C-alpha cells in the first residue's frame, strides 16, 4: 500500500471512476443514452443558433461566420472536458461542502486534491460534448483553412486547460462561502459555473469596451471562448497579450486556493452542523 | 504524507491516546424579538460550548471499548477528532501512533470509520462494485482483498447481497454491507458511531455477534458509541462514560453497575406472608444467604437496568455538576 501518488495510481483511480461511469450507464442504457443524446442536441442547438445568426449577417462583431463557428467549437470542447472530469460534484464543490459531505473524503487514504481530480471522471456519460466539439473544431479549421502545426495544437490544449482552470477556480472561490453558510451557499458553485456558460458563445467584438473589460475581468465570460479563440486565430483582442488568459487563470487560481484553504481550516475547526446524505455517491 | 512527519506520541501498544483534549464550538443565539434581530445584525450573539473538556484516556490495542453518554455529551465529536475530521482546540491526539490531523492519509490505511446514519456505498451500483472501488482507492493488494472479501461474505452473510444495488437494500442489509466495506483493508482500529441505529433485533444481534468475533479472533481494536446500554454491555469489555464533555467513568460494566447501585436483587416471599429483599453481586453469596432462610414460598429476581441507573445519575449530575468528578476513573484497575 504505497503512500506516494504516482501516475500509475492516478490512472488506476481514473479507471475505477470510468468503470463506475460505464456500469452506471449500462444499468439503464435506454434512459442514459436519451439523456446523453439530449445533452448533445442541446449543445449543438446552442452553437447552431449563434452560428446561423453569424451566417445570416456575415459574421458578428469582428468575427466572420467561420471564426464564430471556431469559437463555438472551442466552447463546446470546454463544456465537454468539464463534463468529462466534473461529473461527481467535484467541481460543483459547494454541494459537497454545504451538505457536510467532506467527511466522506477525509476518511479516504488519499490527498484531497487527488480525490477531487479523479473522482468525477466520466468518459462514457460526459464524453459526448467533447466529441461534438472536436468535430466542430475540425469543420471550422477546414473552413478557415487553418495551418495546423504541433505548436498550434499545443497552444489549443494550453488555452483549453487555462479556461478550465478559470472555471474551476471560480467555482472553488465562490464555493468557499459554503464553509461559512452551508445551506445558503450549497448551490453557489452551480451559479458560478452556469454564469460562465451564459455569454461564452457570444462574440464580444462588437461591444463597447465598458462591457468588454468587465467581461474579461470581474465576470470572465469573455475568457471562456471568445478571447482564447481569437488568440488561437492570431488576432488577440483589445491589443492585449495572448498570455492574458493564462495570467488571469493563475491569479484567480491562487486567490481560490487561499480562500478555499482558509474555509477548509474553518470547517475542520468548527465542523459542519449539517449533513445531507443524498448526491454524494452515485 | 512525508515519512518524517511529526507524530504526537511514542510507539507503544496504545491504539488511541487523548491527552488533555478540549474541543470548543460556538453556537448562534437569538431570541424572537425585533431588538434581538437588529442587535444580531451588528453583533451576532454566540454561546461557547465546550464539547470536550480536558479529556484524557488511552485505549490499548485489542480492546473493545464502549463510548457512551447522553445526547450532546461529545461522543460524535470524539469520533470525528479521532478520524481527522475535526481538529481539537487544545490537547494532543494519537491514533495508532499517528496524528489524525498531520498523518491523515497514512492513518486511513489502518483505520475504519462507520457512522450509523451515513453510507460509504455507491448508491446506484451493486455492493460488489463499491467493494471494488474501495480496493482501488485504498490500494488493497489482490490477495488481501480476496481473503477479506471471502471472510466478510461468509461472516456477514452477504452472499445474496453482493450483486444487489445499495439503494434497494433494507437498513440492516445496508449496514452489513457498509461494515463489510469498512473491513476490506483489514483496519487495526474501528470506530463505530451508533452502528445499531435503527436496526431491528435480528440485524442488531447479527452485528453484535460479528463485532465480538472480530475483536476476539482478529484482535481488532473497536471503539463503539451507542445509546443502547444493553448492546454496549454485551459487546464491550470496558466503558468510557462521557458527561458534559468530561470522562465521568472509565472501567468495566460490573464496576459501573456497582457504582450506580444497579445490583441484582432477590425478593424472597415466605409462607407467613413476610417478604425480604437481598441485594447481591455474587450468586454464591446469594445461595449461601438463601440456605440460611426457612419457610421460603417463592424467590423472584430483579435487576435495575444500566439505562435506568444512568438516567438517574445524569439527572444527579445535571443538578449538581460538582459531583461528576467523584466518579472519574473510579475503576482504573480494570484496564
Image (tube, grey):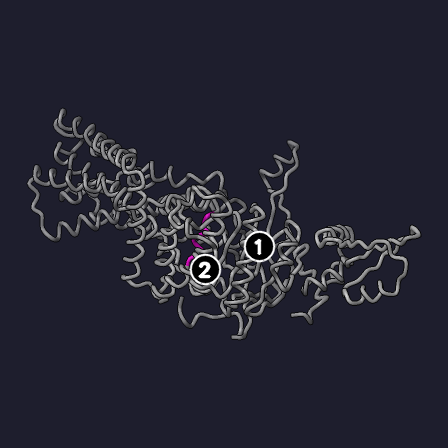
Principal secondary structure, stretch drawn in magenta: helix
Tag 1, which chain? B
Residue A173: tell me if it is visible.
no
Are there few (<14), some (14-19), or many (20+) residues within 10 Å of tag 2? many
Subunit that carries the residue with mark 2: B
Task: Give the x, y percent position of residue A35.
Answer: 28, 34
In the rendered image, which quarter contains the N terminus of chain B?
Answer: bottom left
- Taking depth in this image into account, of A159 and B51 the one nearest to the observer is B51
Residue B179 position within the rendered picture, expressed as x and y whole percent measured from the top left: 48, 55
Residue labelled with disc 1? B77
Magenta residues (range): A101-108
Query: Percent x, y for residue A240?
Result: 21, 44
Q: Position of residue A168 (x, y in %)?
A: 33, 46
Q: Are marks 1 and 2 in contact (CB under 8 Å)?
A: no
**Residue farthest along the right direction in this orientation:** B272
The residue located at (27%, 62%) in the rendering is A8
Amino acid at each position: 500500500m504505497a503512500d506516494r501518488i504516482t501516475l500509475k495510481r492516478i490512472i488506476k483511480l481514473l479507471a475505477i471512476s470510468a468503470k463506475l461511469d460505464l456500469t452506471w450507464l449500462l444499468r439503464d442504457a435506454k434512459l442514459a443514452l436519451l439523456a446523453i443524446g439530449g445533452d448533445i442536441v442541446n449543445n449543438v442547438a446552442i452553437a447552431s443558433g449563434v452560428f446561423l445568426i453569424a451566417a445570416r449577417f456575415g459574421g458578428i462583431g469582428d468575427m466572420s461566420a467561420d471564426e464564430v463557428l471556431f469559437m463555438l467549437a472551442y466552447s463546446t470542447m470546454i463544456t465537454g472536458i468539464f463534463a468529462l472530469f466534473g461529473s461527481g460534484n467535484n467541481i460543483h464543490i459547494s454541494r459537497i461542502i454545504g451538505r457536510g459531505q467532506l467527511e466522506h473524503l477525509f476518511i479516504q487514504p488519499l490527498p484531497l486534491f487527488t480525490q477531487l481530480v479523479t473522482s468525477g471522471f466520466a468518459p462514457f456519460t460526459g464524453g459526448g460534448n467533447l466529441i461534438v466539439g472536436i468535430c466542430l473544431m475540425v469543420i471550422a479549421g477546414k473552413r478557415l483553412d487553418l495551418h495546423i502545426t504541433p505548436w498550434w495544437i499545443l497552444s489549443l490544449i494550453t488555452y483549453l486547460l487555462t479556461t478550465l482552470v478559470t472555471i474551476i477556480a471560480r467555482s472553488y472561490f465562490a464555493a468557499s462561502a459554503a464553509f461559512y453558510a452551508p445551506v445558503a451557499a450549497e448551490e453557489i458553485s452551480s451559479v458560478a459555473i452556469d454564469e460562465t456558460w451564459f455569454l461564452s458563445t457570444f462574440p464580444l467584438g462588437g461591444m463597447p469596451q465598458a462591457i468588454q473589460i468587465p467581461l474579461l475581468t470581474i465576470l470572465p465570460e469573455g475568457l471562456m471562448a471568445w478571447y482564447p479563440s481569437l488568440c488561437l486565430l492570431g488576432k488577440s483582442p483589445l491589443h492585449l497579450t495572448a498570455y492574458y488568459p493564462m495570467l488571469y487563470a493563475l491569479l484567480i487560481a491562487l486567490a481560490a486556493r487561499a480562500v478555499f484553504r482558509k474555509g477548509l481550516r474553518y470547517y475542520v475547526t468548527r465542523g459542519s452542523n449539517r449533513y445531507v446524505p443524498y448526491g454524494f455517491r452515485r | 504524507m512525508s515519512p518524517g512527519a511529526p507524530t504526537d506520541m511514542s510507539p507503544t501498544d496504545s491504539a488511541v491516546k487523548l491527552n488533555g483534549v478540549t474541543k470548543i464550538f460556538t453556537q448562534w443565539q437569538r431570541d424572537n424579538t425585533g431588538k434581538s434581530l437588529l442587535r444580531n445584525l451588528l453583533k451576532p450573539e454566540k454561546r461557547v460550548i465546550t464539547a470536550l473538556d480536558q479529556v484524557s484516556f488511552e485505549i490499548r490495542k485489542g480492546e473493545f471499548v464502549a463510548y457512551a453518554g447522553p445526547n450532546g455529551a461529545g461522543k460524535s465529536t470524539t469520533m470525528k477528532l479521532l478520524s481527522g475530521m475535526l481538529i481539537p482546540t487544545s490537547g494532543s491526539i494519537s491514533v495508532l501512533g499517528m496524528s489524525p490531523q498531520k498523518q491523515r492519509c497514512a492513518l486511513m490505511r489502518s483505520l475504519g470509520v462507520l457512522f450509523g446514519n451515513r453510507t460509504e456505498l455507491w448508491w446506484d451500483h451493486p455492493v460488489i462494485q463499491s467493494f471494488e472501488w474501495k480496493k482501488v482507492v485504498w490500494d488493497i493488494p489482490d490477495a488481501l482483498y480476496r481473503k477479506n472479501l471471502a471472510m466478510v461474505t461468509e461472516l456477514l452473510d452477504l452472499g445474496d447481497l453482493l450483486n444487489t444495488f445499495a439503494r434497494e437494500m433494507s437498513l440492516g442489509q445496508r449496514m452489513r454491507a457498509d461494515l463489510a466495506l469498512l473491513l476490506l483493508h483489514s483496519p487495526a482500529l474501528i470506530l463505530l458511531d451508533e452502528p445499531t441505529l435503527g436496526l431491528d433485533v435480528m440485524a442488531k444481534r447479527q452485528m453484535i455477534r460479528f463485532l465480538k468475533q472480530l475483536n476476539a479472533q482478529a484482535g481488532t481494536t473497536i471503539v463503539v458509541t451507542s445509546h443502547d446500554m444493553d448492546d454496549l454491555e454485551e459487546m464491550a469489555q470496558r466503558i468510557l462514560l462521557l458527561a458534559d464533555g468530561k470522562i465521568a467513568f472509565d472501567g468495566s460494566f460490573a464496576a459501573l453497575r456497582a457504582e450506580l447501585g444497579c445490583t441484582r436483587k432477590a425478593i424472597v416471599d415466605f409462607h407467613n406472608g413476610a417478604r425480604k429483599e437481598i441485594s447481591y453481586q455474587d450468586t454464591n453469596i446469594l445461595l449461601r444467604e438463601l440456605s440460611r432462610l426457612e419457610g421460603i414460598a417463592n424467590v423472584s429476581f430483579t435487576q435495575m437496568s444500566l439505562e435506568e441507573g444512568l438516567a438517574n445519575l445524569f439527572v444527579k449530575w445535571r443538578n449538581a455538576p460538582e459531583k461528576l468528578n467523584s466518579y472519574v476513573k473510579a475503576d482504573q484497575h480494570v484496564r
